Image (tube, grey):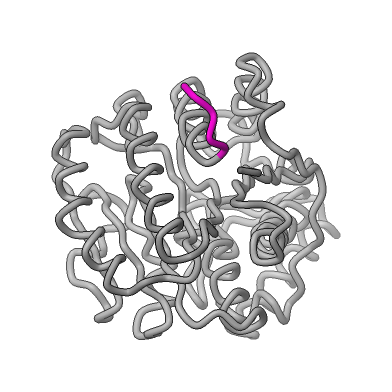
Amino acid sequence: MTTAYYSPPECRLHDMGHGHPECPQRLDAIHDHLRATGLDIAIEWQDDAPDATPAQLARAHSPGYIAEVQDQMAQVRATGERHAVDPDTCINLGTRDAAFKAAGAAIAATDAVIDGHASNAFCAVRPPGHHATRDESMGFCFFNNIAVAARHALDDRGLERVAIIDFDVHHGNGTEDIVAGDDRILMCSFFQHPLYPHSGAVPKGTNMVNVPIPPYTRGPEIRETIEAMWMPALNEFRPQMIFVSAGFDAHREDELGQLGLVEADYEWITRRLLSVAQTHAGGRLVSCLEGGYALSALARSVAAHLRVLAGVAG
């Protein structure tokens, strides 16, 4: 089993300021842990990826929104001054390169898996994407990397059915906004509720399996919920590829949420998703980093996720 690992260096350039939780050090923590544990030699490290093109981004975002973001990024580059798009999210000098590379990495990973160059792939990229709606940047996100990749698989690579799984502690409102009502996509998620962005309790489409989870819920209860809610829907849908919005901020050490997952839970979730991929999709799975802000917990959780994808014993 070959696992491709995409993490273009440009993704470190996006920096929203001292003390911001969505920081370049997130990738450093992951990379350092993979090297310290020797897991880096079990994956195929891809240090580069092409920029996503406006046409590729338009699979998930409106052309007007893409043009607006590009104009904002160009203005920041011209003036050197940050531009805030919401109270928690701003464009800075490195944002343009990071955002286009992050989406481009998700597309490149999709192509590598479909073409058989890798069994599956993980994209350690930032900025994250699952809060970016069709027409709006928010929640640390500019382009919806996983939605762009899923639509690429459908519209450009000819697949007929794909699933998107989101296990971030926050509801993937942007992804839901983009894919709700698209019967080619089944989206399954759990998320703490109530919590930012205060959405998801009422699904926007019949292709959504939204599972709001109360604060302080721990792994055993979430595993039961996945078995009861996600697995029947996924097996009935029979996706030809699985895309994962892999947020690790539901970890009990992460202060941006109040759920109680640990590394063993992420390992278990990954095994269940991989089993669906192996049954229905020839093992094809692409995972993209979303949240996860307690650096040590993030690194350990990504490693647990990768060990399953790469078939490495823990």
User: For residue 260, what is the image quadrant?
Assistant: top left
Q: Identify the residue at image location x=73%, y=77%.
A: 54
Q: Is residue 55 magenta?
A: no
Q: Nearer the viewer, residue 256 or 303?
A: 303
Quadrant containing the N terminus is top right
In the image, residue 240 sits, relative to residue 113, either above or below, namely: below
Q: Identify the residue at image location x=18%, y=59%.
A: 229
Q: Identify the residue at image location x=59%, y=70%.
A: 148
Side (left or right) of 309 relative to 176: right
Counting labels gives 0
Q: Nearer the viewer, residue 26 or 265?
A: 265
Q: Position of residue 216 (x, y in %)?
A: 16, 33
Q: Position of residue 251 (x, y in %)?
A: 34, 31
In the image, residue 27 sits, relative to residue 239, either above or below, namely: above
Side (left or right) of 267 relative to 219: right
Q: Nearer the viewer, residue 87 or 123?
A: 123
In the image, residue 236 sits, relative to residue 278, either above or below, namely: below
Q: Position of residue 268 (x, y in %)?
A: 33, 37
User: For residue 46, what is the image quadrant?
Assistant: top right
Q: In this picture, which residue range is highlighted in magenta?
A: 310-314
* Magenta stretch: dominant secondary structure: loop
Q: Position of residue 226 (x, y in %)?
A: 22, 51
Q: Nearer the viewer, residue 29 or 206?
A: 206
Question: In the current view of this chain or complex, which residue is farthest to the top?
Answer: 36
User: For residue 208, what is the image quadrant?
Assistant: bottom left
